Amino acid sequence: MDAPTTRSADDGTPGGGDGWFTPRKQPVSAAGSEQGTSEGRRLAALRPVSRGTAGPDGEPAQDEAQDPASRIPAPPSPWTASASDQPQQLAEPPASVQTQEPTETEMPASAEPRAPVPPPALTETRVPAQRSAAPAGTPSPDAVLVRRTMAEVAPVADKVTSYFYALLFVRHPDLRSLFPPAMDAQRDRLLKALLTAAEHIDNTPVLVDYLQNLGRGHRKYGTRAEHYPAVGECLIGALSKYAESVWDAETEAAWVRTYTTISQVMIDAAAADELRAPAWWYAEVVSHDLRTADIAVLTLRPDQPYPFLAGQYASIETPWWPRIWRHYSFASAPRSDGLLTFHVKAIPAGWVSNALVHRARPGDVVRLGPPAGSMTVDHTSDSGLLCLGGGTGIAPIKALVEDVAEHGARRPVEVFYGARSDHDLYDIDTMLRLQQSHAWLEVRPVVDRDGLLQLPDAIRAFGPWTEYDAYVSGPPGMIRSGVDALRGVGIPVERIRHDSVEELVAAGH
C-alpha cells in the first residue's frame, strides 16, 4: 500500500517545489524536458527523442555512500542498444486474457497487445537469439538457469532490491532524477518487472506483448536506450551477489542473453511509438463528480487528440505527486468531443487516488501516459459479451457497452455488476439507462451477502455462456474468482480477457 514519505508543506502538498507544475495553472516543463516550450506545453510537432525505458519505480538502498561490493564489469556488447532509427516490427501477440480495474495498484507487467493506433507496418521481430530451445513444453536451457537464480534469491528479495538500487544510483547517479522522490512503495517495481519478464522468457506471446507495453509506457519517465546497460549491469551485480551458491559463468551468460532480449524488445517498441505518439499528454480536469465519499468520476480534456480503444486504460500523474503514476480504465468509448472519463476510488494512503478524488478540481491539469490494455471488443465477431465488473471495475465495462452500441451490432451483452453493498453500486443508474436504450443489453446487479463475493455464483445461475466472449474487471481477488467461474462454466481461457497481468502471467496464459 502506498504511503507518502516525502516532506510536505502544511497544506499537505509536497514541499521543496518538487512539482512539475502548479495546480490550476498552465503546466511548466522542467528544465531539460524534451517535451515542452517556454510556455510549458509540448511542441506541436513531435520529433523523435531518445528510446527505451527502464521503468523508474525504484528506491536507493539506505547505504548509498559507497559502491556496495566490487564493481561488476560493464555488460557485454549484446546489451548495447540498437542505434537504428528505423524500428523493426515486433511479433504481433495474440489477444490475451485481460482487464484492469482502475485501482491504486500499478501494474508491473502487462500483456497489453493492441495499441489504439497500429504502428507502422514493419517486418520482423528484432530480438537477440537465445540458446537453443528445448522441445515444446519443456523449458529452454536459459529459462532453467534463470528460474534457478530466481528460486535462490526469492527468500532475500528485499536485500536484492536494496542492493540493486544501491548499485544503480551510486554508479549512475544521473538516473536518480528519473525516479519518484518518495520510493517506499515504488522501489521494487522496476526490479519486479525485469524479473517477471526473465522468469517467463519462454512464453513469447505474453512476454513480447508485456515488454512492448513497458517500452511504450515508460517513455513518459524520460528513459532512453542508453540507460539499459546501466540497469543490466546492476541487475547482474545484485543477482550474482545473492545467488552466489548457484551463480557461475553459464548462469551469467544466460542472464545476459535474457536481459538482451528484454531490453531490445522494449527499445524497439519505444522507438516505434515515438513515430506516432508523444510520451505523455497534458489533460485539464473539466468536471469532478463525487459519487460517494471515496469514488469520483473525472472528465478530462487532453491538450491534443488522444486515440484509444474502449476497454483500455491510461496511467495518470497528478501535480501533487510528481513521477508517481497509476493506471485507470477509460469509463467511456472514444467521444467525438475528445473528452476522457475515469472512475477513481480513493484507497487508504493512496497517493494518486486520494489526490484525484479529494483534491483535484476543474481547471487542474494532470498528465496522461499512453493508452494500453487489450480488453477490447473484436468487432469482426458476432459472439455475445459476458462482462463482469466489480467496484470501479464497472468503468471499462461501461465503455465496452458503449462501443458495441456505436458499432450498431445487435449482439447480446450480459453485464454482472458486483459490489459489496447497494451503496457501492454508484453507477447503476447509468448502466440501467443503457439497458433501457438497448434491447440486447442485460444488466444484473450482484451485491455481496455476508461479506462473501457472490459474482461467481451469479454467473453459474445463468447461461449457458459457451458462445460468449468474457471480460473481467475489478480487484485482483475478484478477477481470480471470476476467471475460475468462467472456466468452470465452459468458457475457453482464450476467450476470457482481463488486464490483471500478474494473474495472466502466473497462469501461464
Image: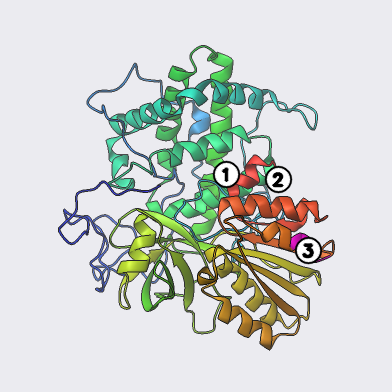
Q: Which residue is mark 1?
A: 265
Callout 3 environment at 10 Å: few (<14), some (14 to 19), or many (20+)? few
Q: CA distance from mark 1 to mark 3?
A: 44 Å
Secondary structure, mark 2, is loop
Q: CA distance from mark 3 to mark 2?
A: 27 Å
Extent of the magenta region: 459-463
Q: Which residue is mark 3?
A: 461
Q: Earlier along the polypeptide chain: callout 2 or callout 1? A: 1
Give the label, 3 or 2, closer to the camera.
Answer: 3
Which amino acid, mark 2?
His
Q: Nearer the viewer, residue 185 or 196?
A: 185
Describe residue 283's horizontal placement relative to residue 244 as left or right.
Answer: left
The relative height of residue 132 versus residue 23 in the rendered view (above or below) is: above
Callout 1 environment at 10 Å: few (<14), some (14 to 19), or many (20+)? many
Is residue 79 highlighted in magenta? no
Q: Which residue is mark 2?
A: 509
Question: How are the residues colored?
Answer: rainbow
Q: Position of residue 36 (x, y in %)?
A: 31, 65
Q: Nearer the viewer, residue 42 or 81?
A: 42
Residue 89 visible, this angle: no
Q: Residue at x 76, y 57 (%)?
A: 495
Secondary structure, mark 1, is helix
Q: Residue at x 25, y 69 (%)?
A: 23
Q: Nearer the viewer, residue 440 or 43?
A: 440
Q: Quadrant of the C terminus?
A: top right
Describe residue 241's horizontal placement relative to residue 130 as left or right.
Answer: left
Give the label, 1 or 3, closer to the camera.
Answer: 3
The relative height of residue 359 versus residue 108 in the rendered view (above or below) is: below
Which amino acid, mark 3?
Ala
